[in-house]
Amino acid sequence: MAASTASPSSVPACGLRCWTTSPQYFTVRLLCSSHWRRTIPQLDLRMRRPPEGPFVYMSLTGTVAQSDNVLAFLWKEYGKADARWLYSDPTIVSLEILTVVLDGILALVLINAIVKDKFYRHFVQITLCVCELYGGWMTFCPDWLNGSPNLNTSNWLYLWVYLTFFNGIWLVVPGLLLWQSWLSLKEMHQKKIDVDKKSN
């Protein structure tokens, strides 16, 4: 299959091709071990940053609830599950600023590091994943400790789709990338040990 035999020179265009072809092609590319790690940071940039950037702007200049911005509709809908997104909750806005600015930069650096096989790739990947997991924890833990007054768990759509599924994605993806970094670092360490043994 072409997806598994793509040459290194074709890698930079992989993410773009995935977005401009059929869903089946995208799925195959995502699951191929030689491409999925490059696709996930691009997904992070394409799926999260476009709506989250305007959210930060709306929250710093007012509230989502008061905004008539086109993208405000998205956050007003999500706000039915978590009311903090409607009224510029300081913890949420602080985390989103971190997500948009720092995580956005790290995702760009990571894509470049993966494509060009840079030595710092796993350092950046681990840092980005820890930021994502920390953001997920700090999004919900403060509200849980207060008895979840802002979370609407009485509706299955809000609980299982908005809160669980959409947020769960950004727990699973960083977890998989951390696991991949762990295995790669372990392999590199073992190779170094083998080289040292041969030299002795």
Image: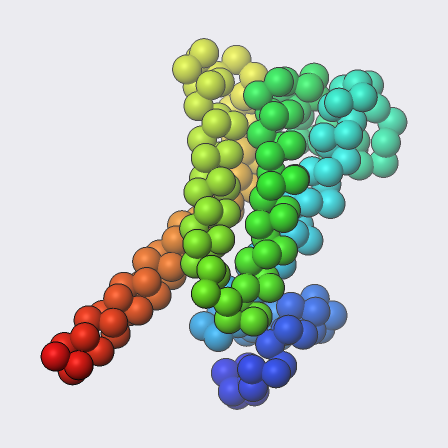
Residues 34 and 199: in front is 199
Residue 26 locus on image (x, y percent): 61, 70
Quadrant housing residue 166: top right
* Residue drawn at the location 54% of the way across and 64% of the way down: 113
Between 155 and 187, the one nearer to me in the picture:
187
- Number of numbered markers: 0
Q: Is residue 29 visible?
A: yes
Quarter of the figure with residue 40: bottom right
Q: Nearer the viewer, residue 32 or 49?
A: 49
The residue drawn where x is 47% and y is 60% is 120
Asked if residue 161 can be seen in this view, the reply is: no
Between 65 and 128, the one lying in front of the other is 128
Coloration of the structure image: rainbow
For the C terminus, the image quarter is bottom left
Quarter-of-image position of residue 25: bottom right
Residue 103 in percent (x, y) is at 58, 44
Task: Residue 69 in the image: state x and y as whole percent.
Answer: 86, 31
**Residue 111, percent from left and from top:** 59, 62
Q: At x 58% / y 30%, what residue is drawn?
A: 95
**Looking at the picture, does residue 33 appear above or below residue 78?**
below
- Give the residue drawn at x 70%, y 17%: 87
Picture layout, residue 145 above or below residue 50: above
Which residue is the extreme one toward the front?
200
